[in-house]
Image (cartoon, grey):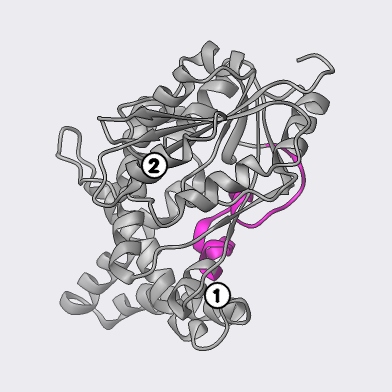
Amino acid sequence: MNERWPPVSVVMPVRDEAQHLRRAVSAVLAQDYPGTLEVVIAVAPSADPTEDVARALAADPRVRVVDNPAASTSAGLNAAIAASTGEVVARVDGHAELPSGYLRRAVTVLRETGADNVGGVQEAVGRTPFERAVAAAMTSRFGTGDARFHYGGEAGPADTVYLGVFRRQALERVGGFEQSLVRNQDYELNWRIRQSGGTVWFDPTLRTRYQPRSSLGALARQYGEYGRWKRAMLRRHPQSLRWRQLAPPFALLGLLAGLFVAFTVSPWGYVVPAVYLAAVLVASLLGSRRAGFPGGLLLPVVFATMHLAWGAGFLLAVRGAPLPEPDPL
């Protein structure tokens, strides 16, 4: 990448995003970026007017729309990347709103570090008490493990980052996103980039607002999918396994084993559920300030749902078993 500001292509896979898409695209087009920008929106079949909104936005010559009939995030990303032209490719979701200096900062970090992909923090921000509880859980190490993109930390090489601003040549080198993965495609792509000798760089100053799921059922489905597709990804790259990915299934197995022992052998079996419950309550107390009131009161059930749904999804992802339809992109 030379010293001029390279053209940037922002790729957006969208489905059922009519409510948020206009704000997301407007935030991209308003970026404080000295080079040229284009936005390529890959539209999946939607139950709302997402395609109409996207076509209207394409009245701006900087915006282009492509179809994503496969309806998966990976397929949409690859279709948008293929239709784009920039030397730098930035992934943005249809409900994300980039701060004005995001792309300038990301390209600067690409230059300074020589990285192939740069990303930052998924800044979960809720509107309702339940969403605020989920946001607090997502920014807790107890809730999501040691992945820095959830809560911040020191800048430097990372396993994966939120969204991502890529050198096009890196995407071409590894063949783009793996379309067989409905979830966990970001981690898998970043794994291949690192295995090919590239660097994935975390920069905590890059922060993108994320709105959590708004109901317990939607949260359970989301984390169940994360667990199932993590298992699918690990079948492909078993050496990529990290300790945090085993914590939820082991927690679920421990709880089930403890309850079985308690009901059939000895009341000592209640020790494991009691220890987990105590950990949930302590983590909820620590996170209650961020969640506010009454969101803090919901934290125990939010933590348990995230852990147990992820663990169940991971354990139930038997090879060859049908996988659930994904939530909207």
Question: Which element carries disc 2, helix, strand or loop?
Answer: strand
Q: Judge the density around disc 2: few (<14), some (14-19), many (≥20) Cα neighbours within 10 Å.
A: many
Q: Position of residue 206 (x, y in %)?
A: 70, 46
Q: Earlier in the sequence, mark 2 or mark 1?
A: 2
x and y percentages locating residue 31 in the rendered image: 70, 42
Q: Which mark is residue 329?
A: none
Q: Is residue 76 left or right of residue 217?
A: right
Q: Which mark is residue 283?
A: 1
Is residue 290 among what the camera can see? Answer: yes
Q: Mark 2 — residue?
A: 14
Q: Which residues are magenta?
A: 136-157
Viewport quadrant of the C terminus: top left
| Image quadrant where residue 10 sits | top right
- Nearer the viewer's eye, disc 2 or disc 1? 2
Query: Residue 253 lies in magenta, yes or no?
Result: no
Name the foreground residue: 191 vs 94.
94
Rendered residue at 56%/66% (across/down): 125
Please say whether residue 234 is visible from this viewpoint.
no
For image coordinates 61% across by 48% down, the residue present is 27
Residue 182 horizontal/vertical position (percent): 32, 37
